[in-house]
Image: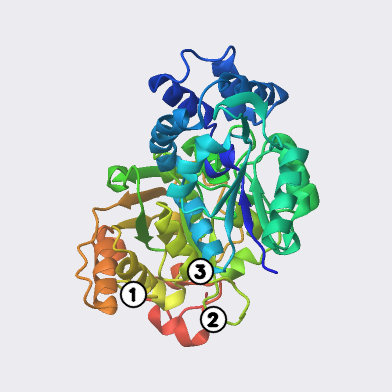
Amino acid sequence: MTGAAFFDLDRTLLPKASGPALSAAMRETGVVSARMPGEALLFGYFNLLGESLGSIALARQAVLVARGKTRDAFDAAAELAADVLEPMVGPFARMLIDEHHAAGRPVVLATTTPEHLVRPLAARLGIDHVIATRYEVGDDGCFTGRNGGHFVWSMGKVAAVREWAEAEGVDLDASFAYSDSIYDAPLLRAVGNPGAVNPDPRLQALAVAARWPVLHFDTSPGVLKLPVIGMELQRAIALLARPEVFPYAKFTVGGVDNIPTDGPAILVGNHRSYFDLVAMAVAFRRTPRSARFLGKKELFDVPGLGSIFRAGGGISVDRRAEDPDSPDAFAAAVRAIHGGELVAMMPEGTIPRGIHFFEPGMRGFPGAARLAHLTKVPVIPFAITGTEKVWPRSAKIPRVTNLLGRPEVTVTFGEPVDLKYRSVPRDMERIFDAITEMLPDEVREPARPTLAELALTYPDGVVPAEDRWFAVDGDEQV
């Protein structure tokens, strides 16, 4: 027996209630003449906090509105509503539907919303089956004002799903279910692979306690959103990253207008310090967007810190490919781009140390160009300077006491790189050149350092004997 994938509709496949679109479509096509009492207030509450007994009471009363009307009287309204609702289904939801199909699982829409109103939407989304509330039809072909089976909500939904699964030979233990509502907890418990999507506060608590995955179909998998307000953790951090929070540095951010206001792009820049993360947070405070940053696996392996990186949308990169079970960072980046997100990376892979820190130009991995060739999305270069003066490689923490002679930290975003898409290595050179051109002369072609300056670029603050020659005072003691 195979499994299936069951999707709830409102606040799951859709980011909010379908009711307003359905109500407007029915009024426009003339099958109803007015809104139901309290409709706007209940839908507003639903969109903010999720399902309530009030919204379900409204759904139960909807059967009376259909009494005396033929089933096909609602066809035009259902198609009109589908025109509005179908574009609201996000790309990550569509990708998940495709993945279940690719795995051979039928995809099922399991919703309280009346079946005759949602079937056109299900068809447009490529959904195979619909389990929804059905209205009873009398001998005259008209709705009677009563339900014709389960009211597909809570225990009624799981009962309808069990009946369907038994009839179709579907194994619920091998199945997946996705919902936002605590009232769908019976369904989520009935399958082997539950997923809490955009969960209401009570389902969020249950999912954490039960260790169920918490998903959001408008972001990459694993991204944490703050309950109720629905803000990404990364955006919250960016909003808190005010320059005055870091009084030991002066920030200058330029070229933010070069970051697309919507749609995917690849941001590629240089790496000079651990403080680069703070600099980028300050820079992203000036945009309405967040990005999926690629970082080395070693950072994600740090207890506590790694969890924060993942929750903030970070993508772990196993540079040495030592762990065969490590997730494919490239696939995760492609997924994010297909979902319309920004992907950011520093292709040097790590902070250059020693002599390499002072070499002109850049060198690193070609992943940014590979990703650009595969996706054909804009590549936006960015250049960071000054962060190494705030937090040198040799220090365990930033120089937080440097309040008088504060170093200037700059983050500059450039115009999209003109790639030719004929050669990955050559296009990677174009990306490196675009970043380098935005750097000041003293960074682009740095002077040879003193031993003290060279020592700042090593993790232990000690220049190896074989590298001392590079310093202008290399014959002296450090």
- Lower sequence index among marks 2 and 1: 2
Q: Residue at x 67, y 36 (%)?
A: 200
Image coordinates of residue 417 in percent, x first then y, are 23, 61
Q: Nearer the viewer, mark 3 or mark 2?
A: 3
Query: Residue 359 — which label?
Result: 1
The amino acid at mark 2 is Arg
Q: Which residue is mark 3?
A: 329
Q: State if disc 1 and disc 2 touch (CB < 8 Å).
A: no
Q: Which residue is mark 2?
A: 320
Q: Nearer the viewer, mark 2 or mark 1?
A: 2
Q: State if disc 2 and disc 3 touch (CB < 8 Å).
A: no
Seen from the viewer's position, the closer of residues 216 and 476 is 216
For the residues labelled 2 and 1, the Cα–Cα distance comes to 24 Å
Badge 2 marks a residue whose secondary structure is loop
Q: Residue at x 54, y 81 (%)?
A: 320
Seen from the viewer's position, the closer of residues 414 and 85 is 85
Q: Residue at x 33, y 42 (%)?
A: 261
Q: Is residue 423 visible?
A: yes
The amino acid at mark 3 is Ala
- Lower sequence index among marks 3 and 2: 2
- Residue 2: name its quadrant: bottom right
Q: Is residue 473 visible?
A: no
Image coordinates of residue 204 in percent, x first then y, are 71, 42
In the rendered view of the protein, which quadrant contains the N terminus?
bottom right
Answer left or right for 454 relative to 169.
left
